[in-house]
Amino acid sequence: MPLLIDSQRINLSLTVAQLVEMHPRLKEGARNLTSKPSQTVEAKGFLYVQQREFAVTTPKDRSGATCLAHLDGSDTKAEVTTITSSVKSFSSNAADGRLEVHLVGGFNDDRRLSQKLTSQLLNSLDQQKDEIHLVTLCVSELNDKLEDDVHLPIIYGIAVNVKTGDLFPATFQDKGPEEDLRSARSFTGGPMINIYDAKTELLNIGPYYWRPSPYAYFWLEQDDERILQNLSTSPLAEPPHFVAHMRSTMMFLKNNPEPQNFLFPDKKPRTYKKNESGLWESVVGGTDLNKAEEVYS
């Protein structure tokens, strides 16, 4: 079934600029979204989705489902199919609903990786069995700004209010639980995964496995500029915490060369559930992870 804008099938041969020219509502929607001030999201009552992760949930007072996913182009077609199926599995009782998609992220990067991923996403969505309605398109030039002749994304992070469906630009006080573990999994080539079970309200992390990485030792010895230039797809556009985040991930890989022997000895996930305060609390696998002994700024 086709991917639709205002009940019209998208012409996938068009560029983003041509699409928004044909459908001005998309440009207006992107402008409204990028003009919103970024909100700082607290950890309470919040689920953070990292790269190559997605989560689906449904509020108790609505029949529809909401999915938030961070795709990076690793296997777009399979990822879109998995995400669509997951949303449908939570919306089986919504007789009058429809599948809607909001694409946010990317900018006019020098390597045109964002444009390539946008094209992959649109094509993959168009190949799904169900009609999918494109509601928001805030990508490429629609999410781009120039500062000192350098292209930067306007929106770096996005959040959704599950109860209302509202999207807004966001920064995050907390990116856990187990931020370094989850980052290490995606860095070592882990595929897109669903991290949340809405039926049990459990966040399941792992079990994950990777081989000892000699690269972790190598990168921990490099200066910040070399890490930035070599581990980022867009070095000039990275937020200030990028290098510190990469160092933390590398230190975690160094300290945990064989996660199956320490992090997941029983081959079960490390499981979390919201406590009465709305914060994630470990309910399975209480062993603390190795923490980096060195602190990098």
Image: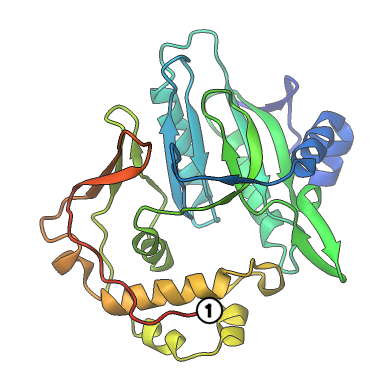
Q: Residue at 70% x, 51% y: name it.
A: 155
Q: Is residue 82 left or right of residue 135?
A: left
Which residue is outermost to the front? 277
Mark 1 secondary-structure assignment: loop
Please name whichever residue, 270 or 10, is drawn nearer the observer in this view of the structure. 270
Mark 1 packing: few (<14 Cα in 10 Å), some, or many (20+)? few
Q: Is residue 235 left or right of residue 127?
A: right
Q: Is residue 15 visible?
A: no
Please name whichever residue, 2 or 71, is drawn nearer the observer in this view of the structure. 71
Q: Position of residue 12 (x, y in %)?
A: 73, 40
Which residue in the structure is indicated by mark 1? 297
- Amino acid type at image mark 1: Ser
- The correct choice, above or below, for 17 with respect to 64 in the image is below
State which quadrant residue 194 falls in.
top left
- The correct choice, above or below, for 215 with respect to 2 in the image is below
Q: Is residue 267 left or right of residue 118?
A: left
Q: Residue at 53% x, 31% y: name it.
A: 128
Q: Position of residue 230 (x, y in %)?
A: 58, 80
Q: Position of residue 179 (x, y in %)?
A: 39, 59
